[in-house]
Image (spheres, rainbow, N blue to C red):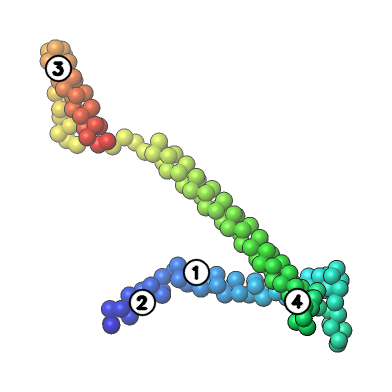
Amino acid sequence: MKKFLEEFKAFALKGNVMDMAIGVIIGAAFGNIVTALTENFINPLIAVIFGGNSEDGVQIGGQFKIAGVAFNYGAFLSAVVNFLIIALVLFIMLKAINGAAEKAKKLAMKKAEEGKEDEPAPEDPADIALLKEMVALMKETNPEAAKKVEEKRAEALKKTEEEAK
């Protein structure tokens, strides 16, 4: 049980969970703003278009009655408009976030490529440097032997590249 609680604490304190909680709180607040917009501006417009006033003079959305049962389609239209506004804003925000992430990724790749070009070639280890000196001397004294060494080196490099694939 103690291990479970430790794992839960580690999970709950991660940045992702906190970010999600902040998103939910902001989403709820935004939902309240959109609800106020629809109730105070869009519903009266629906009432003007489709008609409908309650007995106390407060405008309500359209409704119809069947067998004495009232169907308030104005409230349904209000909920649909609410949903569409929230979905549109979330879509725009997600599109902007994805665009920014893509630009950041491209910029990071570009900087990484530029960094590779600026770096000097790594120095050869001592044994490789010694072998290169020996080949240079061989070229001066015995060009045929040096040619054979170069061919074997090329074969070894080719084999190493194939194994890496």
Q: Earlier in the sequence, mark 1 or mark 2?
A: 2
Q: Which residue is mark 2?
A: 8
Near mark 2 (Cα within 10 A), the count class, few <14, some 14-19 or many ≥20, is: few
User: In front: mark 1 or mark 2?
Assistant: 2
> What number is the disc on residue 148?
3
Position of residue 126 relative to residue 27, above or below, is: above
Which callout, 4 or 1, points to the residue nearer the camera? 4
Looking at the image, is mark 3 or mark 1 nearer the viewer?
1
Q: What is the quadrant of residue 139 in the picture?
A: top left
Q: Amino acid at mark 2?
A: Phe
Q: Which one is in front, 16 or 59?
A: 59
Residue contact between numbered discs 2 and 3, judged by CB atoms under 8 Å: no
Q: Residue at x 15, y 29 (%)?
A: 130
Quarter the C terminus occupies: top left
Residue assigned mark 4: 72
Position of the N terminus by quadrant: bottom left
User: Relative to residue 79, is residue 143 depicted above or below?
Assistant: above
Q: Is residue 84 left or right of residue 104?
A: right
The span from disc 2 to disc 3 (Cα, nearest Å) is 65 Å
**Residue placed most toward the observer, 76 or 135:** 76
Name the kind of residue labelled 3 in the image. Lys
Give the mark nearest the N terminus, 2 or 4: 2
Extreme-front residue of the structure: 67
Residue 164 lies, in percent from the top left, at: 25, 36
- How many numbered circles are shown? 4
Question: Who's the residue at 44% across and 68% down the image?
Answer: 15
Disc 3 element: helix
* Residue type, mark 1 in image: Asp
Looking at the image, residue 82 sits to the left or right of residue 24; the answer is: right
The residue beneath circle 1 is 19
Q: Name the element at disc 4.
A: loop
